[in-house]
Image: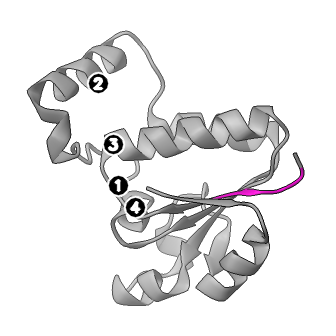
Amino acid sequence: MDEPLSIVLFSGTDDKLQAAAVIAAGAAVLNRPVHILLQYWALDAFRADRIGSDHGLAPEAGAAGAAALAQAAADGKPHWSENLRQARELGGVEIHACALSMDLLHLQPSDLDPLVDGVQGITTFLAEAGDGQIVFI
């Protein structure tokens, strides 16, 4: 599997950030390159001063989803950011901030958590995706 898995991460809710982290980790275990592009609300969640904050859940999660995630945290399950850190340690996982979203949110690279490798435009992201899959979350 040489084709990369490219993830456009748009949502900034904890459940969707966790889903992206799990997908990235799974691909990394399979030695598949992973490119993540952070847009809008996902990018906001990667601010250095907010990455560990509660980012809420998607509306469809409801009370049961909130309870399940609270229990997972109480049971010592890792935060989505820790799952991404572990995926990066496996190798082949790159995380970039969308240049347009950086401008829109008035962010500088120094505002972002060290998990973010840099800033990238959509054209570069798509070129790196090649013929591989692109997942939108």
Measured in 3D between alpha carbons, the distance from the residue under mark 1 to the one under mark 2, in whole angstroms, is 18 Å
The residue pinned by badge 1 equals 50
Q: Nearer the viewer, residue 4 or 76?
A: 4
- Quarter placement of the N terminus: top right
Q: Secondary structure at mark 2?
A: helix
- Name the N-terminal-most of marks 3 and 2: 3
| Circle on res. 69 | 2
* Magenta span contains residue 131: no
Q: Amino acid at mark 1?
A: Arg
Farthest residue to the top: give it: 75
Measured in 3D between alpha carbons, the distance from the residue under mark 4 to the one under mark 1, in whole angstroms, is 11 Å
- Name the N-terminal-most of marks 1 and 2: 1
Measured in 3D between alpha carbons, the distance from the residue under mark 2 to the one under mark 4, in whole angstroms, is 18 Å
Measured in 3D between alpha carbons, the distance from the residue under mark 3 to the one under mark 2, in whole angstroms, is 9 Å
| Circle on res. 14 | 3
Measured in 3D between alpha carbons, the distance from the residue under mark 3 to the one under mark 4, in whole angstroms, is 9 Å
- Name the N-terminal-most of marks 3 and 4: 3
Q: Amino acid at mark 2?
A: Leu
| Circle on res. 42 | 4
Indicate whether 15 appears above or below 33. Answer: above
Report the magenta residues as a range. 2-6
Please name the residue shown 48% across and 25% down the image.
78
Crowding at mark 4 (Cα within 10 Å: few <14, some 14-19, many 20+): many
- Residue 74 image point, x, y percent: 31, 13
Farthest residue to the left: give it: 63
Left/right placement of residue 46 relative to residue 3 reads left
Please name the residue shown 34% across and 39% down the image.
15
Q: Is residue 52 visible?
A: no
Please name the residue shown 76% across and 39% down the image.
28
| Disc nearest the viewer among 1 and 3 | 3
Q: Secondary structure at mark 4?
A: helix
